[in-house]
Amino acid sequence: MAATVPALLRQAHRLRKHLRELQSEIDLGPRVSKAQQSHLTAEEAVHKSAYDLAAKLKMKIRDEEGTLKQINVQLAKYEKQLNEAGSPKEYEGKQSEIRQAKEKIDLTEEAILTSMEELENRTAALPADDTRWADSQSQFQQQQVDAKERLERILEDQTLAKDELAKVDAQLPADAKGQYERLIARYGPDGLAGVHGRSCQQCRTAITEQQKAELINGKFICCPNCGRGLYAAD
Ligand SMILES: [Zn+2]
């Protein structure tokens, strides 16, 4: 016995909803992939900045060491000038400059020590930064592989569902086909609706007992309220 129109609509509804879900998963793919790519790019930046920071600290230490050398040269000059001071006032002035130079030397040496300590800590953390970056890269690669496999599965499923739907559609009698196609063109999968008890699942309006009986007997009925093609869902 050939399937009734409502029975075919039930199958068509299930398949069309399934195809819609598959399509939205396919559509989501590029967005997911883009987010994963952004994450990888951000991780790359984190990794790079860890090395940049270490390089900057090295440069800072070199600069501070250069400054220290200059002050020492200046100090030697002041000490020489102190010995050659012509007056007590000049002598005092040189002593003050020497004091200031020595203070600067202390401060610069302290700054160098701080920078070296920072550099040491930063350098010690680099292997962890490398590990994190390597993990991010392999995670990304795995995501790419997974996404590809997932897409292949979805496409396979899509092909099967499309074939099945084509078979269902082909069984629809000619007098139902036009209306069916108009509903699908207008509402997509939501052009069809199950009826639970007497309630249309699209608009929640009740059909009459007689309509329900006709539906069960295989008649093609559209919801009097929302116009959807109905089938008995229970
Ligand atoms: Zn309805």
Image (cartoon, rainbow, N blue to C red):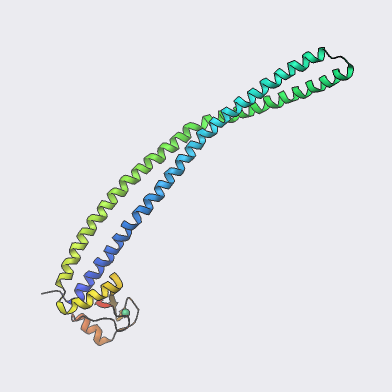
User: Is residue 44 found left or right of 30 in the rendered image?
Assistant: right
Q: How many marks?
A: 0
Asked if residue 113 shows in the view, the reply is yes
Residue 179, given in percent of the width and then of the height, sits at 22, 78
Taking the view exactly as shown, the residue that stands out farthest to the front is 86
Asked if residue 234 shows in the view, the reply is no
State whether residue 129 is above or below residue 187.
Answer: above
Residue 85, given in percent of the width and then of the height, sits at 84, 14
**Depth check: 159 or 200 in front?**
159
> Residue at image x 49%, y 32%?
126
User: Is residue 111 found left or right of 83 in the rendered image?
Assistant: left
Q: In which quadrant of the rendered view does residue 120 lie?
A: top right
State whether residue 112 is above or below residue 20.
Answer: above
Residue 158, given in percent of the width and then of the height, sits at 24, 59
State whether residue 70 is above or below residue 191.
Answer: above
Q: Quadrant of the N terminus?
A: bottom left
Q: Which quadrant of the picture is home to ligand 1? A: bottom left
Residue 187, given in percent of the width and then of the height, sits at 30, 73
**Depth check: 173 or 34 in front?**
34
> Residue at image x 62%, y 26%?
63
Q: Quadrant of the C terminus?
A: bottom left
Q: In which quadrant of the rendered view does residue 61 lie?
A: top right
Q: In which quadrant of the rendered view does residue 26 lie?
A: bottom left
Taking the view exactly as shown, the residue that stands out farthest to the left is 1
State whether residue 213 is above or below residue 163.
Answer: below
